[in-house]
Image (tube, grey):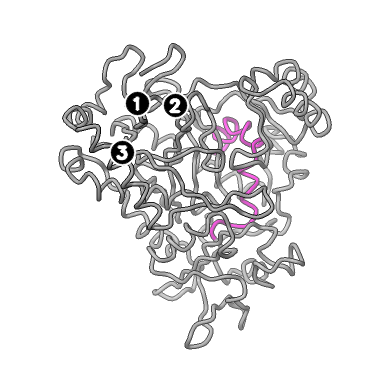
Amino acid sequence: MTTADNFDEMWGTDESLREPYRGFCEWLDLENPARLRAKQREAEELFRLTGITFNVYGKSEAEERLIPFDIIPRIISGTEWLRLTRGIEQRVRAINAFLHDIYHKQEIVKAGRIPEEMISRNDAFLPHMIGVTPPGGVYTHIVGIDLVCTGPGEFFVLEDNARTPSGVSYMLENRETMLQMFPELFSCNRVQPVQNYPVDLRRSLAASAPTGATDDQVVAVLTPGIYNSAYFEHAFLADQMGVELVEGHDLRIIDGRVAMRTICGYKPIDVLYRRVDDEFLDPLNFNPDSMLGVPGIMDVYRAGGITIANAPGTGIADDKAIYSYMPEIVEFYTGERPLLQNVQTWRCSEPDALAYVLDNLEELVVKEVHGSGGYGMLIGPTATKKEIAAFRRKLKARPGNYIAQPTLSLSTVPVFSRSGLAPRHVDLRPFVLVSPGKIHVTPGGLTRVALKKGSLVVNSSQGGGTKDTWVLET
């Protein structure tokens, strides 16, 4: 099950079953492999019937795909989860404090902890947010922290998703599918629930409404529309929360409020959970050609008339160059040492770092600072000489557009393959809800799995799949 270089979360490093998997494996040993194969096919059919798909771009038109799902859960002990939760909460507090600071006094820049050009020349820095404090002081209402495991209890943060983190619908559907197919598993394993997420999200968003909002806060989800890669999730979350799913043409500004069209006329909105990027949010303030946003919504927002979740301008906290400063950011704003460590990162904008990266491309992972979805990256150990040569030219042309990291020995978790259980690399995206005075980490998250043998790329757009993530009761 394991390799010499990888830690397997079920079998450890010495082929001995790890405690969190003990109850599951006792059940698995009694199962007929033919029944499990039938259940795997049944899961795929459930996903197809439910319409759990995503769009892949980059071709002449978007291609809709079914997201692969594996029936072997990833299992984390309650004790290990408590440690992770403390580190996640600390990091999210620091990110919110950092965002408030850079749009106000920029004390971290004055203290010399982050170079000024990292802020002022950053494409994700939004001058429109200077001097603006969101309702309740919350910038990142929903956060996804991507984690990788390299050994027992050894988790590293791979990146922060503070703009519009996606994937929570897959987390929920993965659990629903497992509950439907294997109810007996949940009666003999004390698994913490994730099904309350939509209720928790609705409550957290309502708690972030502007001062003066009515007791029955009106929440809506803003989607770019059916052609967006995450449209399934937008519609799913709106339905699960019991709120309206709206597009830009459904909204207008009336009497200084953002209002949505209903069969009874226009109704003011208190909180807008937007899944539209900053650039397209307001054609009067940003991209004038945008048909996805609401003309004038930023003026209402700056006046305190609506909460936008996540706040405009939070994308700078997604920036992978800023990520490299997160240990300093955590220490600066919390006064504590980071409980979760970063992966070592070379900023290619720095001459010495660039020289090192160019000399060691075959051993490193190189990423665009604003990249996502596994696009625009190089995995040196698996790249061809031609791919490395092409990336070398990109790096020399725009070094500030890239960071580099070592190729980590990611943990593996078994998947159910035709030949039985087989190890595959995984990462984890826990989802965090932030409201004034409260941070809630959902017990579990989205486990993404690289379904190709030896692959380190877990993104669904690059052929990865998902698993149900169990956090056991302590």
Circles 1 and 2: CB atoms closer than 8 Å: no
Q: Is residue 217 left or right of residue 162?
A: left
Distance from label 1 to label 3 (Cα)?
Answer: 24 Å
Mark 2: which amino acid?
Cys
Residue ID at (68%, 48%)? 105
Mark 1: which amino acid?
Ser
Q: Please identify the quadrant where the C terminus is shown.
A: top left
Badge 1 is on which residue?
419
> Which region is colored magenta?
309-333
Residue lying furthest right in this view? Answer: 397
Q: Is residue 35 left or right of residue 323?
A: left
On residue 149, the disc is 2
Q: Quadrant of residue 227?
A: bottom right
Badge 3 is on which residue?
470
Q: Is residue 345 above or below residue 376?
A: above
Distance from label 1 to label 2 (Cα)?
Answer: 26 Å
Mark 1 lies on a secondary structure that is: loop
Residue 129 or 80: which is nearer the viewer? 80
Residue ID at (74%, 36%)? 401
Residue ID at (40%, 19%)? 7
Q: Please identify the quadrant where the N terminus is shown.
A: top left
Mark 3 lies on a secondary structure that is: strand
Circles 1 and 3: CB atoms closer than 8 Å: no
